[in-house]
Image: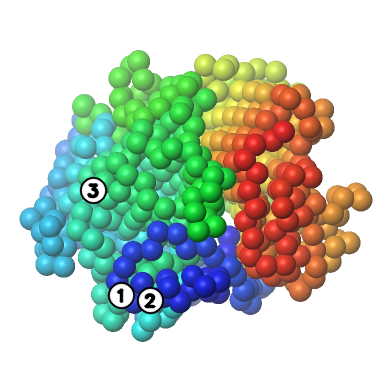
Amino acid sequence: MRTLRTTLRGAAVAAVAASLAAGAAVTALPATAAPTDLDEGRTMAKASTAQAEQDRTSKAKPKTKKPKVKKPKKAVADPDFGANVTFIDPTWSTDRINALLDSVNDEEEMSQDRHQVFFEPGTYGSAAGQDDPATATGIINQTVGYYESISGLGAQPGAVQINGALHVEPVVGCPERPWECAAPGSLNNFWRSMSNMAINPIQRPVGADAALPFPAGVTDPHQMRWAVSQAAPMRRMDIQGSLTVFGRYGEFASGGYLANSRVAGTIATGSQQQWFTRNSQVGTWDGGVWNMVFSGVEGAPATDFGQDLGDAVKGVKTTVDSTPVSREAPFLYRADNGELAVFVPNAKTDSSGTDWSTSAESGTSIGIRDFYVARADVDDAASINAALADGKHLILAPGVYELDAALRVDRAGTVVLGLGYASLTPTAGNAVLEIGDVAGVKIAGITADANVPESATLIQVGPEGASVSDPADPTTLTDVFVRVGGPWEGKAVTSIEVNSDHTLLDHIWAWRADHGHGVSWDGNTGAHGVVVNGDDVTATGLFVEHYQEQQTIWNGERGRTVFYQSEIPYDPPSQAAYMDGDRLGYASYRVADHVTSHEATGLGVYSFFNQGQDIRVESGIQTPHTAGVTFRSMTSVFLNGSGGINHVINDRGAPAVGSFASPQVIAYP
């Protein structure tokens, strides 16, 4: 999402640097930016794969050989998930576990390799050093890298107990004086996840970081770091201590997403520009920069968005007491009979707090034999579609699937579960996923990568004019991520099109790449990230960035969004190239003029035009002015560059133009 940004603004710089040099914590660090050169090399999928392998093998860090897994005896053998899925069980030594984790955590940002690591139920690591991490031994302690998902296989998070830390650290820009270099930090810490485990936090720096004069991986006792940005969810986790989601020295971060989790201690947000927490339980929440939203969170701070907190500081937190519609992510677990199964939670309305139940009242357990396990080295669109047509649910093992036709889901209630950031890319200008006119489909854990020739749509939820839906069992997209450009040149007019009523979008990141391969105004082209045509569609955690026209269009009635984050494109070459008719620029979030009922809470639209042109957006949000269409807690932010956003919503809100600004509008109309 980010090019690198420079230093903090205003008089706070010296004070922050002095505080960090003295070892003090920072609770809120707003960021500005200056671009670096973007890699605009064009390459297709196979060429990019070869380059990724060359990059990996040329790295100074030696690869640790992946140990063979000795699995406990089970009633029926597990399916063959392929070489990119590893099952760890309690017979493994701590050293062996850490070595395995170290062998899969060093993928490059645009790598084509993918990894899923599962912990079987059991206890891992020693808790003896929990009060003094600097001297702790025998702990599970490694960083989590690109395209790596780590999950427990228990029916409850506590069935997998980790004594140690599975952590994410910022990229350190200035090893000798890290408090002076907030960039690159965690701005590009994407595409990694953790779920369904309990962690007793005992963290130490590892690898090259441990040898730095100021290691990034040091934390307080009973604290773990998860310094991430987009597409890095933490779900169904029991953190038995505190969690920090930014770098030790205040490095920039632009995340993030936490759901159905409990953090017993403090969540320290520091330099996190925005964060969305849903249906969770927190001890204490500390900090926030621009847009911190809580939905159905026990222990959430009170709403203070737009309130004067003194010293020219405005509140940035918005709390929604309950989530209007929610469904937790389906997950793989080890059933009592020793076989693998997938638990699919029911949808809920007006819910709050965690729900870790796997009872029949809470959801449905589907045996592994009802799933077709696809592998990118074996399967293509035809073989996967044949299995779906035969009534199978689908698990996509980690890998990059090149598809000459869309995967077709035409059976109500079908579950499609991606492991380890399984990625789908079209090869013939097709979509990668099309859901028929059916209800109750669950899609989770997949990434769609645009390719060439251009696709009209990458993911389509229901055909045009879809009429079948079930509000009690909404079709749900969970942790679904889209990229237009980045790994290679890609083109797609619309990334996600929702035609089915009562669809739930839970944690979506649609990204027209601002860096990587094939990135230019005329190269990785994409008009819209998300277009909603269905009625009664709900989005919880919607991230849509850099598209060339309206990034999100809402045509359906009674739509709801809780948390929205967006950057308008960096790279329009001129104002003339970025005009919505006679309107300056394109609104990021657009509610169609005919809509009479819509509500959205917690929206941030950010500006960074990096072509040296005075380019303006008339407003970050454009909506009909009517009583049934309501917004609350909105901000525009000027990050850096030139031009900016004239108004937050319609003609309301101060400009964010020419230099850092973050004007707010508390409510509209």
Rounded to the nearest whole Å, what is the CA distance between mark 2 and mark 3? 28 Å
Left or right of residue 221: residue 348: right
Residue type highlighted by circle 1? Ala
Residue type highlighted by circle 2? Ala
Label 3 neighbour load within 10 Å: few <14, some 14-19, many 20+: many
Left or right of residue 328: residue 45: right
Residue 460 in sight from this viewpoint: no
Label 2 neighbour load within 10 Å: few <14, some 14-19, many 20+: some
Q: Secondary structure at mark 2?
A: helix
Residue type highlighted by circle 3? Gly
- Image quadrant assignment for residue 76: top left
Q: Quadrant of the N terminus?
A: bottom right
Q: Residue at x 75, y 31 (%)?
A: 555
The circle on residue 241 is 3
* Residue named by callout 2: 18
* Residue named by callout 1: 22
Residue 60 in sight from this viewpoint: yes
Depth order, front residue of 397/646: 646
Q: Position of residue 417 (x, y in %)?
A: 46, 37
Rounded to the nearest whole Å, what is the CA distance between mark 1 and mark 3? 25 Å
Q: Residue at x 46, y 57 (%)?
A: 272
Q: Secondary structure at mark 3?
A: loop
Q: Quadrant of the C terminus?
A: top right
- Image quadrant assignment for residue 77: top left
Query: On screen, 131 above or below 327?
Result: below
Q: Position of residue 83 (x, y in %)?
A: 36, 54
Depth order, front residue of 111/520: 520
Label 1 neighbour load within 10 Å: few <14, some 14-19, many 20+: few
Q: Residue at x 68, y 46 (%)?
A: 529
| Residues under numbered marks 2 and 1 in contact, where contact means CB atoms less than 8 Å apart | yes
- Image quadrant assignment for residue 476: top right
The circle on residue 255 is none
